Image (cartoon, helix red, strand yellow):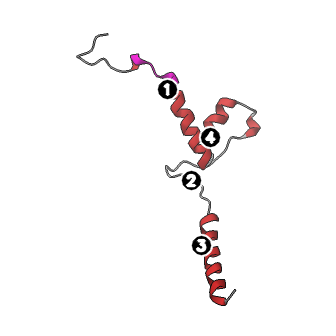
Amino acid sequence: MDSEQKLEKGDALKKLSSNVYVKSVDTLKDGIAVKGYDMNQGLDYQKVFASYINTGFQATAIGQSIECINSMINYRLSDDPIAEDEQE
């Protein structure tokens, strides 16, 4: 391997490292603090699932899905106003 190939390989590794090893942030894009469930409170599944929304990237996606599903479960047609051209 000549010096030019070593340099290219080193540059590729630096680029790879800079994309893989990124600095962590303390807040999500909406300004919500990243914080997991406090297990010292005991195990409450409702609170554990609710805490997913601000635990981290993948857990946030799960938390948003849980909120969406819960809103679908809790939805009632009676919550929507009746349009003038509709019958009760």
Residue position marked by numbered label 1 in the rendering: 72
Q: Secondary structure at mark 2?
A: loop
Could you say which disc has been placed on residue 2 in the image?
A: none
Q: Position of residue 53 (x, y in %)?
A: 58, 41
Could you say which disc has been placed on residue 27 in the image?
A: 2
Q: CA distance from mark 3 to mark 1?
A: 44 Å
Q: Secondary structure at mark 4?
A: helix
Task: Please give the range of residues in magenta.
Answer: 72-78
Q: Are discs 1 and 2 less than 8 Å apart at CB?
A: no
Q: CA distance from mark 3 to mark 2?
A: 25 Å
Q: Is residue 78 left or right of residue 58?
A: left
Earlier-in-chain disc, 3 versus 4:
3
Circle 1 residues within 10 Å: few <14, some 14–19, many ≥20: few
Q: Secondary structure at mark 3?
A: helix
Residue 41 magenta-highlighted: no
Question: Between residues 47 and 66, which one lies in front from this camera angle?
Answer: 66
Could you say which disc has been placed on residue 15 in the image?
A: 3
Kindly give the residue lying farthest to the left in the view shown.
85
Residue found 71% across the figure and 41% down from its top: 38
The amino acid sitting under disc 1 is Met
Residue found 27% across the figure and 19% down from its top: 83
Q: Nearer the viewer, mark 2 or mark 4?
A: 4
Earlier-in-chain disc, 3 versus 2:
3
The amino acid sitting under disc 2 is Thr
Location of the N terminus (image quadrant): bottom right
Q: CA distance from mark 1 to mark 2?
A: 28 Å
The amino acid sitting under disc 3 is Lys
Residue position marked by numbered label 4 in the rendering: 52
Q: CA distance from mark 2 to mark 4?
A: 14 Å
